[in-house]
Amino acid sequence: MRPLAVIGNVNVDLILGPAEPWPKPGTEIIVDHDELRVGGSAGNAALALEALGVDFDISANTGTDEFGRWLRETFGSRAEKWPIRPEGTTLSVGITHPDGERTFFTTRGHLPRFSLTDVLAALDGSRLSGGYALLCGSFLTDDLTGDYPALFDWADSHGVTLALDTGWPLDGWTEANRQATRDWLSRCGCALLNEVEATTLSALSDAVEAAGEIKRHMPEGAIVVVKRGPEGAIAIDADGTFASVAAPSVQVVDTIGAGDVFNAAFLAALADGLPLSDCLAAGTRVASRAISTLPRSYGSPLSAASAGAAS
C-alpha cells in the first residue's frame, strides 16, 4: 500500500441539535444531543483513516489552550511534531437540523497560522515518496496557503501526489477564489470536490461535464472526483475512464464531515491500488455509515480493499 498523509485544518467541533425552528433572538431551546469531537476537514479524515486501521501521517497545529492539549492527546504520537500556537484553538459550534443538515459558527483561532515550516517539520518526504497527501482547509490556513507553490514543489520533489479538498471559502466562491482554486488544482494529482464546487469552478451545470472541464486544466494523469451526497459520486480516472457509484440508502443522522470521511476511504482504497469504481464505493459506503450512526461509526478496522464492501 502506498503511504498516506493528511495536511490541514484540525480543530474542535461542538455539535448540538437538532434545532427546529431556528430560535428567536433572546430565547433558549433544549436539544436532545451534544457531542464534543475532533473536527476540521483534516481532523475528520484522520479519524476515519484511524478507525479503518489505515496507517497515515498527519501535519496540523493547535492553540495553546485545553482544547489544543485535548486534540494533541487524541492523536498521540502522530501529533508529537505539531506546533502549539499562542492563539486559542479554533472552535466550531455546529447546530444540526432535523434533515441532517447543519449550521456552523466558527472562530478563526489557530488555523490561519499553520505554515509550510510546520508541514515540513512534521512530514518526511522520503517516507511519503510515491504516496498521497490529502490537502485540506485551503481557505482557513492562511500562512500555508500563501506558500502553496513551495508546498507543491516539495511534493513534486518527493513524488507525493496531492489530493486537494479546499473546503468552503469564508467569503463565498468569488472569482478570485475560483481562480485560486484552479491554480492550485493545476499542481495537484487528484481533485476531491463536491458537486457545488465542481459546477461553480467549471461554470457548467452538469456534474459529469464539470469533472471533465476541471480535469482538462489539471496535470496529465490527474483524477477528478465529484461527491454528490445521496446521489453517490462520480470520477474521471487518470486515463480518462469515467466511473460512477450510487450511495446506499440510509437514515441520515449527522452529515458533518461526510465529504471528509469519503476522502479518507477513497484515498485509502486508491493507495491500495484498487480500481476507480472500488475507490468510489469505499468512499460512499464508509461516509454513508458515518452519517447514519450515533455515536458515529466507520465500520470495523479493515484493509482498504475491504472498506469498499463495508456495510
Image: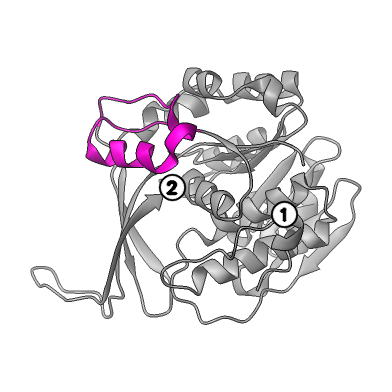
Q: Is residue 178 visible?
A: yes
Residue span colored magenta: 59-87
Left or right of residue 292: residue 160: right
Image: 90 above or below 206: above
Q: Residues within 10 Å of mark 2 (few under 14, many from 20)?
A: many
Q: Position of residue 54 (x, y in %)?
A: 64, 47
| Secondary structure type for disc 1 | helix
The image quarter in which residue 228 lies? bottom right
Query: What residue sits 74% from the left and 18% below the top?
Result: 157
| Secondary structure type for disc 2 | loop
Q: Quadrant of the C terminus?
A: bottom right
Give residue 40's mark. 2
Left or right of residue 198: residue 171: left
Q: Give the number of the mark in front: 1 or 2.
A: 1
Query: What residue sits 57% from the left and 80% below the top?
Result: 250
Whether residue 225 appears in magenta in the rendering, the answer is no
The image quarter in which residue 271 lies? top right
Left or right of residue 210: residue 276: right
